Amino acid sequence: MQTAIAAIFVFLLVILLHELGHFTVAKLVGIKVNEFAIGMGPTIFKTQKGETKYSLRVLPIGGYVSMEGEDEDSNDPRSFNSAPVLSRMGVIAAGAFMNFVLAIVVLSIVSFNAGMPTTTIEGTTKNSPAEVAGILKGDKITSIDGKSVDTWQDIINEIGTKNEKELFEINVSRDNKEIDLTVTPIIENERTVIGIETKVERSFSSAIKGGFQKTGMFLKAMFDFVKMAFRGKVSTNDLSGPVGVISVVGEAAKMGFTDLLLILGFISVNLGFFNLLPIPALDGSRLVFLLIELIRGKPIDAEKENLVHVVGFFLLIGLMIVVTYKDLIRINIF
């Protein structure tokens, strides 16, 4: 039950914000919205408010904003295709934008709850290389081997590049003085370490900064994944569909609300990024067609564009079926 509730919470929130982005911008630029739907399949609840129908559907794995003239011919002056190209591009891009906003918000909450590590030392492990080198509590690390470090992750990355017993210099700020210390690292659990603990800061500003940093980190991971895919280093075994995501969400829910929010942020970044890829049937593909229209001054034939999206849709459905099957095998549901 906990997994089901957590999964519904994550899926509905990510989808709601995504579709709300499309919906809000469409309304702002004067495009007529016929229906705003959360979920797919049969309708559970629906209501009409003005010109728009609002519906909640059985399967919490998708949603849509049905705009007048988006996928069919329409003579309505407020139809999607009657709006300026830049307005339409804004409507399409708004879904992914809202996913990134959601990610920043929830990851800022995660950063506040967990605290943001700083470059100030909270303490050193007894008899560690850091203690031997003379690093003290309250020291603020400013550079390693002359390379400036601004975050705790910078420190981890720089130390991680060193070899065992490879001497290197750490510059620390202590009592308004700059001090250079020589450290000899060791290897523990296959990682290069020197035995330092970071001081954790909890503040609104550091939490917001952490939200942006974590969102950026997840985005970088998405770009790295695409690069690996182009190099042929990714297979369907590396992908997860709704079943796999539900499994991960369930495990995160057992760990606590902060871990659930972390997964929510990752999924939101993932959805926003994936939707902007120029894959037929996705928002990224529609943006490509609109960009072409903007450059050439006239749209591509609607039938040809729709054919591309339809073919892409069925290919994505096929991929989802394969991935879902592998997810079911992976979690031993059979």
Image: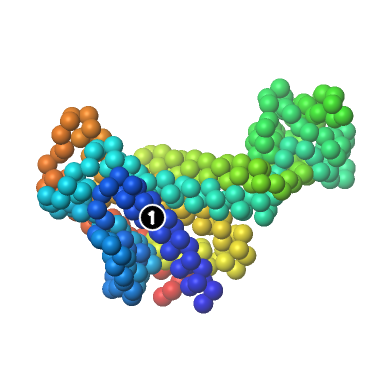
Indicate the position of residue 183 as horizontal and vertical percent values. Answer: 80, 31
Residue 264 horizontal/vertical position (percent): 51, 57
Q: Is residue 270 visible?
A: no
Q: Is residue 58 above or below residue 52?
A: below
Residue annotated with mark 1: 20
The residue lying toward the viewer, choosing from 228 and 65, is: 65
Please tell me which residue is depicted at 50% across the width and 72% down the height of the picture.
Answer: 5
Asked which quadrant contains residue 243, the reply is bottom left
**Colouring:** rainbow
Look at label 1 and name its amino acid: Leu
Residue positioned most to the bottom:
1
**Residues packed near mark 1 inside 10 Å, few (<14), some (14 to 19) or many (20 plus):** many
Query: Measuring 59% from the left and 49% from the top, which residue is drawn there?
Result: 108
Nearer-the-camera pick, 105 or 10 = 105
Residue pictured at 82% horizontal, 34% vertical: 139
Secondary structure of the residue carrying numbered label 1: helix
